[in-house]
Amino acid sequence: MTLALILLSVLILGSAIVALSLRNLIHSALLLVACWAGIAAFYLWAGAEFVAFAQGLVYVGAISMVVLFAVLLTRQGTASEPLGFASWQRFILALVAGGGVAGILVGAVLGTPLTVTTPGPVPVLTVKQIGAQLMGPHVVALLVVGILLTVSLLGAVVLAAEENVKSPEDEV
Amino acid sequence: MSAYAMAVAGSEPFLERAPLLLRDAFVQLLPAPTQWLVHHLITIVAILAVFGLFFAFTTIAERKLLGRLQNRRGPNRTGVPQFSILPWRFKHTLFGLSQPFADAVKALTKEDIVPAAADKLLHFLAPVLVVAFSLLTFAVLPFGRNLIPVELDSALLYFFAAGSATELTIFMAGWASRNKYSLLAAMRALAQVISYELPLMLSVVPVVLVAGSLSTREIALAQGGWTFGIIPHWNVFTPWGFAGFLLFLVAALAESNRSPFDLPEAESELVAGHLTEYSGFKYALFFMAEYFGLTALSGLGITIFLGGWQAPVPFLGFVPSYAWFMLKLVGMIGFFIWVRGTLLRLRIDQLTRLAWQFIVPLALINLLNAAFWSLTRDWTGALQLVRWVISAAIVVGPFVLLGRKLNAGRAPRTYRYATS
Amino acid sequence: MLGSGILKGLAVTAKNFAGSFYDPERMATVQYPEERAPLGEHYRSFPLLVCENAADPLGTLRCVACTICEKECPPQCIYIEKSKDKKPDATGKPQLYPVIFTIDTAVCMGCGICAELCPFDSIKMDKVFEVTATNRFTGLLLERDQLAKSNAYYHSIRPAEAAEVDARLAAERLAAEEKAKAAALAKAAAAAAKAAAAPPTTPPSAA
């Protein structure tokens, strides 16, 4: 089990690191997909079957498509050139921003009381129970997320929709 | 494993248990530590063998059927070679049934060409991954009463998670080929999968709603039984199920890149699209994956709408369940081939419009319909009739209205430069 | 209603499917080696050389090695070498004949220009399309004796055209004969006239 975890973390972290360091955007995107797939496998390893498949479905299946589509539709002129060192000011700002986020994360991790207990019997959660939980106590969160996604979708449609000039060949 | 225990208990006919007994007999021969591994390996090998052969004969069936649909005969020459050991001579043609094997030999012996500018690694990975992903989906299909490779609680979710990854490999193939046509195909594949992933899942959700489970085994079991001893309780024989099945068929066609939604391949415009730069065995792998995907989606359609492995009439119950499944599978594939032989390819804008303006709204309405159906589960007698009428109205009304609205000004098609 | 067109289309193909099993008329294809679709009247494949007598094909070729076809052939697949001597042709006139006449069918595009241009009705288009060879250079290079086909064969593949050609040739032959006869008559007449005129020319000394 531990060996599997090590392999999975190597896959996840390795693909993430390589994705960051590559200059080829498509390769990076595909490695990102590999990373997501690794995370799905990790959930599976952890026994969270539903979350694992949801991760696979949403990230590997859908979001990867959106990412690739965005990469393909983006003009790749000078943007794919390696960025040079711009200025000290920018470097310091980046360091501050990145350091701040890292500090918050590390603080949160260290601040969380991590009680290591001997693993008791793993609760067997069926999808039905998860569904009942989502629709019962957590229905507000679900609805808010749904509304948020719908609003963003509508916003995207509004942004993308424009009066297009119709040519006769466009009929049917 | 409950089904397995039941089967061993011997409460079922011998034919129903035969595959499991065969597997167990073989597993018993091996030392105990390797048994669990061999147990699963046998399942994998069985799926590969059965569906590999099924794929081979689907190709010949497709070619013969397409021929018949176009008033041709299709391939009927390839037979057993001249050194046949058969004592009698029926011209050794066997109706061309050995065509797939001839095709396989041809594909294997062809030169494997990789374009000089291609992304070598991705170009190689794409055909490998596409077969791998399309095979993954077979894991959760219940092929028979006791024949389900992996029993998962959220099997449907797994199915779609594994199935949606195949489009990614099509993108990889198209992009790695460094060919304009291939890249166009990759773009089309992405646009198509973004458009049709949603209706495919929305057409399946009503079944989940009514059956109350994501497990394919449960859904297949829930469709057992007959009304008046003749009409099976399959989902397709309910108004919402029928509508869902039709929506599923359209979305499945689009998802498996079959005609009339074969835009990523589009032999006549994109010179086979993402397959342009592939030859020999890799090309064959893509085809294999395509048929595996189609078979898996057909299997899913059978499981959730056509009663899975259930027999259509009670007195035919003695036929083993896996035979019913395969029979339905053959029927589904036949229908897909029939559609391919009939319909023309859509344009990309027509494809996306059909998805977003027609299929998605109807699928959402169908979801409401299924909710109504499951809420009125207790209605009996005359109320049952009312339930059917309301449910049918929810299906037909939006279909007619939406169809008329979308068709307005578009059909019948007028031709400016040609006489019809 | 939406979708009715799809149902109609499915019905059409279903009809095709069922019909293809019992109605041979529907079939768009034939089972080729056993059955053959009839070739059209003007179907053409590669050129052939017509000869009058099947027993002596090379002796009775209509070809007079005029090399018009060689010059006009667009892909230049014809090669002709003229003879040094002359032989009487179909009309009995002494003519040259080809000692070498080859057509490279690997190059020939079957345009039929040679057959159209031939003033002696010698080169015609064949209807043989099943041409195979084990060597693409010499195997597909047809020699004089392979190209020579009898007039009877020409009749069998293009009856109407061959009959017309025969009639024309017969007329030509007749015309030639008549001309020859007329020439002979004229000659005879001239001779007779000469003879008639001759006596007075005899030297009077003889009398």
Image: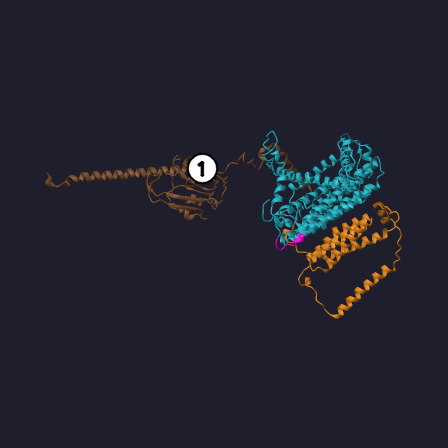
Chain colours: A orange, B cyan, C brown
Q: Residue at position x 78%, y 51% from top?
A: A40
Q: Main secondary structure of the magenta part?
A: loop
Residue type pointed to by label 1: Arg
**Of B381 and B148, the residue lying toward us:** B148
Count up the numbered dots: 1
Which of these two is toward me, B255 or A157?
A: B255
List x then y, in percent, for residue C156. Answer: 45, 35
In this orientation, does residue B186 appear? no
* Chain letter, disc 1 residue: C
Where B14 falls versus B153 (above or below)? above
Task: Give the x, y percent position of residue B201.
Answer: 76, 46
Residue at horizontal 38 percent and vertical 43 percent from the top: C99
| Horizontal side, residue B157 vs residue C105: left or right | right
The quarter of the image holding the C terminus of chain B is top right
**Badge 1, how many Cα within 10 Å: few under 14, some, many 20+?**
some
The span picked out in magenta is B115-122
Disc 1 marks which residue?
C158
Q: Residue at x 49, y 38 (%)?
A: C40
**B235 in the magenta segment:** no
Residue A152 in the image, given as x and y percentages of width and height: 77, 56
Q: Is residue B280 above or below residue C52?
A: below
Residue C71 visible in this rendered orientation of the protein = yes
Q: On the rendered structure, is A37 left or right of C16?
A: right
**Residue A39 picture location, percent across and down:** 78, 52
Disc 1 secondary structure class: loop
In this view, the residue farthest toward the front is B31
Residue B117 on the magenta span = yes
Q: Residue at x 14, y 40 (%)?
A: C202
Question: Which part of the image, by quadrant, shows the N terminus of chain B?
Answer: top right
